[in-house]
C-alpha cells in the first residue's frame, strides 16, 4: 500500500495552480518528511472556483460500514467505481500534494526503504477520495484514502501499490465538480504519470518509525552505507 508520505513543503502548489482565481488556506496540518496514516494531512479541493488547502484525516472507513470492514489509507483504482467507493468518486475527489512517498524492499528485519519522487523535482499530486459531508464523530468516516493502482505494482516493489499521481493540470481536472464519477475513473486510468516520470534512492531505515522526522530521512544514503 501507499502508507508513508513525504509532505515537507507544499508551497509550490500555489505556483502550479496560479491560474486559479482564489486560494484559501484553511488547514494547519503539520508538514512532515515522514507522514503516516492516522494523521491530519494537507489536501486540496476545488469549490466555487477556489482552490482550498484543507486538513483531512488520512484513513477512511464509511460511516455505518460493518465492524468487519477495517479503516484503510488506500482505495484501489479497480474498485473505486464500485458500491463502497462510488459515492465518493462522484462527490469526494481531492488531491494529496506531496514531495514523495516511501516504499520498502527486501525481507524483515532487513527491509530497505526508498524515497520516490518526480524525476524533474516537481510536486506530486495524488488522487484521493473523501466524504466531506460525513456526519459522524468517527474521524475515519470523514477521512480520506489515496487511490492506488495495484495492477502496476509499486515503483520498486512489484508487490506494493503505487499511488495514482497526476500532473497539476490533470489534478485540477480530477477535482472539477463538473466531472462525473465515470469520467474521473477513466482519467485516473488513462493519464496518471508513468514510471519514467519518477526517480528513487535508498534512505535511512529510521524512516520506518513514524515518530522520526527531519530532512535526513528523505536524503539519499551515501554509497558506502550499502555497498
Image (spheres, rainbow, N blue to C red):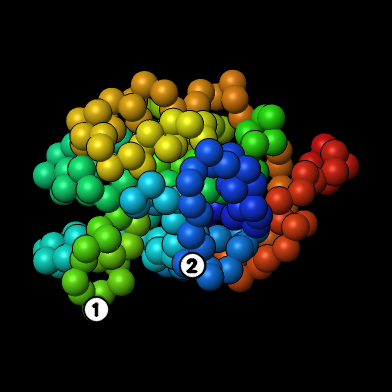
Judged from the image, the secondary structure of the residue bearing numbered disc 1 is loop
Spot occupied by residue 196 in the image (x, y as percentages of width and height): 59, 21
Residue at 52 percent across and 48 percent down: it is 97
- Image-quadrant location for residue 191: top left
Lateral position of residue 50 relative to residue 198, left or right: left
- For the C terminus, the image quarter is top right
- Image-quadrant location for residue 150: top left
The answer to whether residue 1 shows anywhere in this view is no
Q: Residues within 10 Å of mark 2 (few under 14, many from 20)?
A: some
Q: Residues within 10 Å of mark 1 (few under 14, many from 20)?
A: few
Q: Report the front residue among 222 and 75.
A: 75
The answer to whether residue 186 shows anywhere in this view is yes
- Image-quadrant location for residue 89: top left
Q: What residue did someone put label 2 on?
A: 27
Mark drawn on residue 137: 1
| Count of numbered circles in the view | 2
Spot occupied by residue 37 in the image (x, y as percentages of width and height): 44, 61
Q: Report the front residue among 130 and 24.
A: 24
Q: Is residue 188 above or below residue 64?
A: above
Judged from the image, the secondary structure of the residue bearing numbered disc 2 is loop
Q: Are marks 1 and 2 in contact (CB under 8 Å)?
A: no
Lateral position of residue 77 relative to residue 56, left or right: left
Residue at 45 percent across and 50 percent down: it is 51
Residue at 57 percent across and 42 percent down: it is 18
Spot occupied by residue 10 in the image (x, y as percentages of width and height): 61, 52
Residue, far bottom: 137
Residue at 73 percent across and 63 percent down: it is 214
Spot occupied by residue 92 in the image (x, y as percentages of width and height): 27, 50
Lateral position of residue 205 relative to residue 184, left or right: right
**Spatial distance from mark 1 to mark 2, Cα to Cα?**
19 Å
Amino acid at each position: 500500500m501507499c502508507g508513508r508520505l513525504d509532505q515537507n513543503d507544499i508551497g509550490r502548489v500555489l505556483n502550479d495552480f496560479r491560474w486559479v482565481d482564489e486560494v484559501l488556506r484553511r488547514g494547519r496540518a503539520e508538514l512532515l518528511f515522514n507522514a503516516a496514516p492516522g494523521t491530519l494531512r494537507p489536501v486540496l479541493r476545488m469549490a466555487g472556483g477556489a482552490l482550498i488547502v484543507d486538513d483531512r484525516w488520512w484513513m477512511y472507513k464509511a460511516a455505518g460500514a460493518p465492524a468487519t470492514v477495517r479503516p484503510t489509507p488506500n482505495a484501489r483504482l479497480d474498485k473505486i467505481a464500485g458500491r463502497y467507493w462510488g459515492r465518493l468518486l462522484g462527490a469526494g475527489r481531492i488531491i494529496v500534494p506531496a514531495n514523495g512517498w516511501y516504499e520498502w524492499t527486501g525481507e524483515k528485519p532487513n527491509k530497505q526503504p526508498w524515497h520516490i519522487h518526480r524525476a524533474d523535482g516537481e510536486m506530486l499530486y495524488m488522487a484521493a477520495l473523501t466524504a466531506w459531508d460525513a456526519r459522524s464523530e468517527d474521524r475515519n468516516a470523514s477521512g480520506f484514502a489515496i487511490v492506488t493502482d495495484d495492477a502496476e505494482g509499486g515503483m520498486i516493489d512489484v508487490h506494493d501499490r503505487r499511488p495514482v499521481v497526476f500532473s497539476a493540470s490533470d489534478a485540477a481536472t480530477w477535482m472539477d465538480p463538473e466531472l462525473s464519477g465515470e469520467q474521473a475513473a477513466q482519467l485516473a486510468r488513462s493519464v496518471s504519470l508513468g514510471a519514467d516520470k519518477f526517480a528513487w534512492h535508498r534512505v535511512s531505515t529510521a524512516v520506518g518509525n513514524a515518530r522520526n522526522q527531519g530532512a535526513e530521512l528523505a536524503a539519499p544514503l551515501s554509497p558506502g552505507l550499502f555497498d
